[in-house]
Amino acid sequence: MKWLSSFQRISQFVRNRHLISSFLENQELFHESEEESLWGSVTDREEEALKRLVQRAALHPGPIIEIGTLFGLTTQLIASAKEPTRKLITVDNYSWNPFALSPKHHLKFTHRALRTCKHLCNVEIFDGDNVTFYSQYQGERPSMIFIDAQHTYEGVSIDLNWAVERNIPVICGHDYSLRWPGVMRAVDECFTGKIRLYESLWSHFEPSDTRAERHEVAEAFTSHPA
Ligand SMILES: C[S@@+](CC[C@H](N)C(=O)[O-])C[C@H]1O[C@@H](n2cnc3c(N)ncnc32)[C@H](O)[C@@H]1O
């Protein structure tokens, strides 16, 4: 009967070959670019810049929106940097993850990972795509949006248009890099070079003219060449 179980294993592999090949592709990608990001999330240095953007958003009322939760790593970071009462809504349709989990397991894992944040830090998870979220959103103007879901020109443009139409004070996102030309093009077209870059974390906001801010910007961000 040993041959039967071997046969079952082989057919299981064949049935799940798309998951296995995407898992292997991601292993290769993220092992090669360990310096750049942690399994699709941000680098340690980008985390610092993201925290500062959350502090900047605190100058304005309104919730923080994150488009692209994955497993909640940046969600937890934002939640820990914001005031406890400020709402953070994170949006994901579970269409991609680096470990080739099915959407159902991805959702379950992420909800469990964010359980404490949901209970203690006013974090809400929207299970659905960005377009559905935008069409249903009726809340007040957000103070900040962090865009890190689709990485195509068309996808990012949808997020940017929504954010700009609502005049969101702090608009930022991840993966402004040659690996993602669609992100660069959409961001460049939208802000015509008026962004700050910290590694691949980009942001757009009107700076207040305080000395501290000028110092912080000079220290933390390399100006984007127009
Ligand atoms: C790069 S990951 C997000 C990483 C996360 N911000 C972090 O740094 O830990 C992109 C996420 O966006 C989600 N996603 C892709 N397209 C989407 C869409 N149209 N609407 C909502 N979520 C989407 C994927 O399921 C994936 O979880």
Image: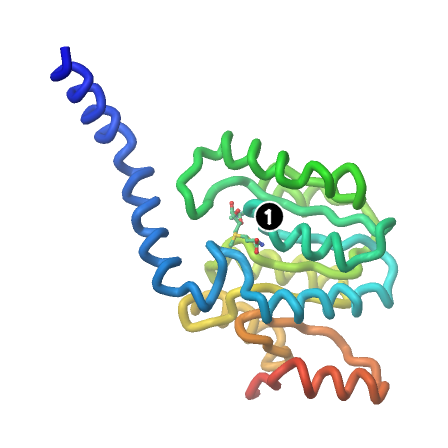
Residue 130 seen from this side: no
Viewer-nearest residue: 162 or 104 = 104
Residue 101 sits in quarter: top left
- Residue 24 horizontal side relative to residue 195, left or right: left
- Residue 93 horizontal side relative to residue 135, left or right: left
Estimate the x, y position of residue 186 in percent, counting from the top left: 53, 68
Residue at the image point whose x is 51% and y is 70% from the top? 176
Viewer-nearest residue: 98 or 59 = 98
- Residue 207 horizontal side relative to residue 41, left or right: right
- What residue would you read off at disc 1? 69
Residue 222 seen from this side: yes
Up/down of 67 relative to 100, above or below: below
Residue at the image point whose x is 33% and y is 45% from the top? 22
Mark 1 Cα-neighbour bin, 10 Å: few <14, some 14–19, many ≥20: many
Quarter of the C terminus within the rendering? bottom right
* SS under mark 1: loop
Total marks shown come to 1
Label 1 CB less than 8 angstroms from ligand 1 = yes
Viewer-nearest residue: 149 or 20 = 20
Estimate the x, y position of residue 10 in percent, counting from the top left: 19, 26
Up/down of 189 relative to 97, above or below: below
Name the outermost residue toward the front: 2
- What amino acid is labelled 1 in the image? Thr
Name the outermost residue toward the top: 1
